[in-house]
Image (cartoon, grey):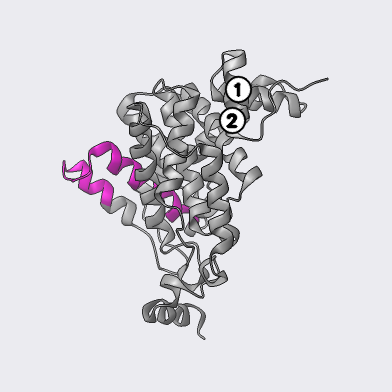
């Protein structure tokens, strides 16, 4: 039997959405129904569980005393929350909430807490941080947030099939870039944007950090990962606003993904999660690694 909802590119996804008059999230669920033995409700419930884990990680990181095993990170998300709770901030409260939420999840991850890799552990804060902020400031119901996760997963699927979401393979552009693309597409659809607008948002987020290296200090998913998730959340919000204002990416989403993959292949191995270049190779980065590992 021919599968009606299979896609492996943004262009095919848009064609399916237009042909069947459906949103991206609907197509993604129906794709899963076609490709698994699970029912629509089972798939939706499983994604709802993912959302619960994400939101719990955000709340834990924002409210608990968090410290990573190495001691490198922890508590910064809570500091930022205190700033916006006191009506301070230059970036706008929704943006600061998204940033703090993204940082919170990465801090939970670094302290061995439970997170959802979205699409990776190193970029797991962007999507929940953004959704948590949108939920609070725009009163988005839980079911709609779950729908947003399906939209995000469709974008992640396309990137994974045609490029990479791995920092070791494509640099941080492939991790926080992909996460931001997923988040941006999701909130565009949550705010009533079209599938085409969602893909424009996703394209712009990746374009904004094309070439970003992966250079974890001491090889740990802690620094600069926490702050890069913060930038990813901001990137997602800005790109979503541009797309909802009907600003388009000059380069189509599929071509942006291909460019990201090619740029990742051109990056030096020292700039792809090896901790041999970038910030990890600075005098301070080297000193920290010696202090942690004793060599």
Quarter residue 76 falls in: bottom left
The percent position of residue 216, horizontal first and vertical second, equals 47, 67
Q: In this view, does 251 lie above or below 148?
A: below
Q: Residue 11 carries which label?
A: 2
- Please name the residue shown 49% across and 32% down the image: 199
- Predominant SS along the magenta part: helix
- Please name the residue shown 75% across and 29% down the image: 35
Marks 1 and 2 in Cβ contact (< 8 Å): yes
Q: Is residue 273 above or below residue 176?
A: below
Quarter residue 187 falls in: top left
The quarter of the rendered structure image containing the N terminus is: top right
In the rendered image, residue 81 lying in the magenta stretch gets the answer yes
Span of residues in magenta: 80-109
In the picture provided, is 86 more to the left or to the right than 79? left
Quarter residue 126 falls in: top left
Q: Residue 15 carries which label?
A: 1
């Amino acid at each position: 039997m021919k599968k009606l909802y299979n896609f492996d590119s943004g262009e095919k996804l848009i064609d399916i959405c237009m042909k069947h008059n459906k949103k991206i999230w609907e197509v993604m669920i129906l794709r899963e129904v076609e490709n698994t033995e699970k029912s629509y409700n089972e798939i939706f419930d499983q994604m709802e569980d993912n959302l619960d884990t994400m939101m719990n990680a955000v709340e834990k990181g924002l409210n608990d005393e968090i410290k990573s095993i190495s001691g490198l990170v922890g508590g910064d998300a809570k500091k930022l929350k205190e700033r916006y709770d006191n009506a301070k901030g230059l970036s706008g409260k929704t943006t600061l909430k998204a940033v703090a939420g993204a940082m919170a999840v990465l801090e939970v991850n670094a302290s061995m807490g439970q997170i959802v890799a979205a699409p990776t552990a190193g970029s797991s804060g962007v999507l929940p941080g953004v959704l948590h902020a949108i939920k609070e400031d725009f009163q988005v119901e839980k079911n709609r947030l779950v729908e947003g996760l399906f939209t995000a997963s469709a974008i992640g699927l396309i990137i994974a099939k045609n490029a990479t979401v791995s920092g070791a393979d494509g640099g941080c552009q492939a991790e926080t870039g992909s996460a931001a693309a997923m988040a941006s597409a999701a909130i565009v659809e949550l705010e009533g944007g079209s599938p085409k607008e969602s893909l424009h948002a996703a394209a712009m987020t990746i374009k904004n950090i094309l070439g970003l290296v992966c250079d974890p200090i001491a090889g740990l998913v802690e620094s600069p990962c926490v702050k890069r998730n913060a930038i990813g959340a901001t990137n997602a919000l800005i790109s979503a606003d541009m797309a909802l204002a009907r600003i388009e990416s000059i380069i189509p989403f599929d071509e942006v993904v291909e460019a990201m993959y090619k740029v990742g292949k051109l990056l030096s191995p020292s700039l792809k999660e090896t901790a041999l270049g970038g910030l990890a190779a600075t005098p301070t980065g080297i000193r920290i690694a010696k202090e942690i590992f004793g060599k």
